[in-house]
Image (cartoon, rainbow, N blue to C red):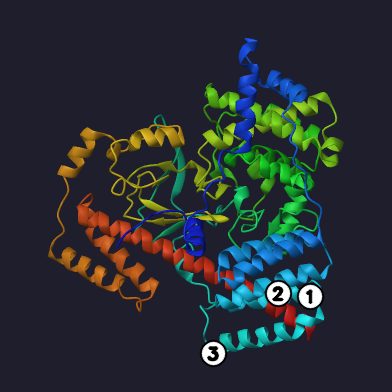
Amino acid sequence: MEVNIRPLQSHLLTRAFGQYKKPDGEFAMMNYYHAFLTETAGLNKQFDLYSTWQYVLANGPRIDVSDGVKSNSKAVAIRQEGNRFFKDRSWADAIEKYNESICWAETGSEELGIGFANRSAVCYEEKSYELCLLNIMLARKHNCPDRLAQKLAAREQNCRQQIAEGNTKGIVPSPMFAINVEVNPKIPFMANGLRMTEFPAYGRAMISERSFQPGDVILNEKSFITVGDSRYLYLNCNRCVEWKPYNLIPCPDCVSVMYCSEECRLHDLRTVHRFECGISAKLKHLHSWLVDMGPKLFFYGLTLFGDNVDEMKRFCESTKRTGSNPMEVDYSGGTEPLEVFKNLQRVKYTKVKDAFDKRVMFMASVFYTVYMQTPLVRSLITTHQHKRFMLHCFMDYMQFAMHANLFCWDIITGPLFPIASILNHSCDPNVVTASGLNYIKLVVLKPIAKGEQIFISYGPVWYQNKDDRKQEKTMSLFRFQCSCVACNPIRLKRWLASQSQLDDQGKRDLQTVNLLLNNDAVPLAAKTDLLQQFVKRNAYTHPNEAFCSGLEVYTEVLYHALMEEWDTNNRAWAMAEIEANDRKCQ
C-alpha cells in the first residue's frame, strides 16, 4: 500500500481536485521586494524598520489593485463559465466558478439565488444530498427566481428520498477521535498528564507525565486564528480556512471573501474583516503565506482590547518576550481570547538578523500602507506613536509566526495553535497530527512512556524519507537543524543495528493487517483498531522495517478516518441547518 502522509485538508483537496493547484508563479510581494532591493542597492545605507517604512511611504510600491464592486453582469458571465464546466462534468471547476459568481452577485438579486441553485446541482451529481438540500435552502433564501422553483422542488424531493432510503454517506458523527483519556481539568481539550518544559536543545517542549497507548487522542485544540492561501479564496472559509466549497456564503460587500457559515462570517466581521473589507483584493494580491498572520493578529488583538490602541500599546510595550507557558491559561470556563493573546505576547523566539529579517521589514511597511487606506484603521491609528506601534507589531507578529514554531501548517492553511505550538519535530514522531482544519488533533502513534517528549513530524518521517539531504532540507524549510536519531548517521546506524525482528505472532498480525486493509467491506474503525493492536504488540521491534511499514499504514488509515469524521460532521451540520429552517417554515 503506497502511503503519502500529508495534512487532512490536503487530502480533501486532492480528493476533489486530483492534485494541488499549481502556484501562480512568484508572489507579488516578492516582486515588489526584489524591486526594492534593486532601487536601494546603490544607496550604501543600512535599512532598519523605521527607515524602510519611510522609504516605502515615499517611494512605494503603490498597490494598484482595486477591489471590485458587486456586479450582476459579471456574476452571470462567471456563472456561464461554471455551466460549461458542469456540462463537461468537471464538478470541481464548476463549483469554484459558481462560488465566484455568488461572490460577485449583488446582494438581494436573483443572480445570488441562481448561484446557489446551480451549486445544488453539483452537489446532487456528486451524491452529496445533505449539502444539496443546504444549497436549495440558500437559493430560496436569496431570491432564486420562480422559474426555477419547480426544478428545485423536484431536486429537493429526490434528495430527501435518497436520504430516506439510506443512499447517503450518513450524518452520525464518529466518536473515534474525541479525547478518549482523562482530560486536564483546566484544559478540557487536552489529556491530563501533559506539561510544558524547556530543554536547551529544543526550547519549549511537551512531555508526558504518564504513559499513553496507540490510538489515545491527547489533544483537540481549536485554532486561535488562521491565515489561508489566496489561491483558494472561492474554496475555503475566510475565517476558519476550512475547505468547504459547498457551504460557502459571500461577504455582502466583498467580491473575494466567503464563509462556511453565518457564524464564521459574523465572527470574522467583528474581529478582523472589518479592517480588511474594502482592501481584500489588495491583501490577496500581496498574500505572503504565514507573514499574513502579522496584521491579522494585530487587528484581532486590537478588537480584544476594545479598539483602544493606547491600552493595547501600553500592554504590549510593557510585556517582554521572556517566555510563556500556554498551559497556564485556564480554559475550564471556556476560551477567553484576551488571556490567550496576552500569553502569546510573552512567547520568546529567536530573532535572526539575516536576509529574511530585511524582507519582513519591507513587508510590514507595505502592509502598513495598504491597511492605512481603510477609514476604520485611519480613525483608530491617529498619532505618530500609534503608527509606529502598528508597524512594529506587524513586524513582531510576522517574525513570531515564522520563528516561534506556532504552526502545524500545510500548503493551504497557516493556523495558530497556542498549545500545540510547543510541540517539537522529530523524523521519528510518536504522535500523528490531524491539521489543516480549524483544529488540531493529536493521536498517539506508538507507545509513549512517562517522561518522554511528545514529538510530531513537520514533514515526512524518517522511514519515508531516506534522502541523505533531508537534514539540509529541514533546515531550509523550518530554519532549524534536526538532531533526532534518524538525522545522526552514527546514532542511526547503532539504532538500526539494535532492532528486534517480528516474532511469529507479529508476522501473522502483519498478514492479517494486509488482508483486511485490501477489503473495502471492512469499516475504517475496524482497520484502525486492528492497526492499533499491531503497533501495541510489536512496538518493541522498532525501528524494524516491517514494523515501520505498519506505522506508515496506521498513519494513513488514521488520516482517512479523520477525513471521514470531518466529512460526516459537515453533512450533519448541513442537515441541522435544514431541519432548523424546516421548523421555522412550519
Q: Are marks 1 and 2 in contact (CB under 8 Å)?
A: yes
Q: For mark 2, what is the residue?
A: 117
Of labels 3 and 2, earlier in sequence is 2
The answer to whether 164 is drawn above or below residue 553 in the figure is: below
Q: Are marks 1 and 3 in contact (CB under 8 Å)?
A: no
The answer to whether 318 is drawn above or below residue 74 in the figure is: above
Q: Position of residue 333 (x, y in %)?
A: 64, 56
Q: How many marks?
A: 3
Residue closest to the eye, 462 or 446:
462
Q: Are marks 3 and 2 in contact (CB under 8 Å)?
A: no
Q: For mark 3, what is the residue?
A: 165
Q: Amino acid at mark 1?
A: Cys
Q: Amino acid at mark 2?
A: Ala
How many neighbours does mark 3 have within 10 angstroms: few (below 14), some (14-19), or many (20 or more)?
A: few
Closer to the eye: label 3 or 2: 2
Badge 1 element = loop
Of labels 1 and 2, earlier in sequence is 2
Question: CA gap, disc 1 to disc 3?
Answer: 28 Å
Tell whether 224 sits left or right of 549: right
Closer to the eye: label 1 or 3: 1
Residue drawn at x 36%, y 58% is 555
Question: CA gap, disc 3 to disc 2?
Answer: 24 Å
Q: Amino acid at mark 3?
A: Glu
The answer to whether 495 is drawn above or below residue 58 in the figure is: below
Badge 2 element = helix
Question: CA gap, disc 1 to disc 2?
Answer: 7 Å
Q: For mark 1, what is the residue?
A: 144
Q: Position of residue 374 (x, y in %)?
A: 82, 40
Name the quadrant containing residue 123: bottom right
Residue drawn at x 67%, y 74% is 134
How many neighbours does mark 2 have within 10 angstroms: few (below 14), some (14-19), or many (20 or more)?
A: many
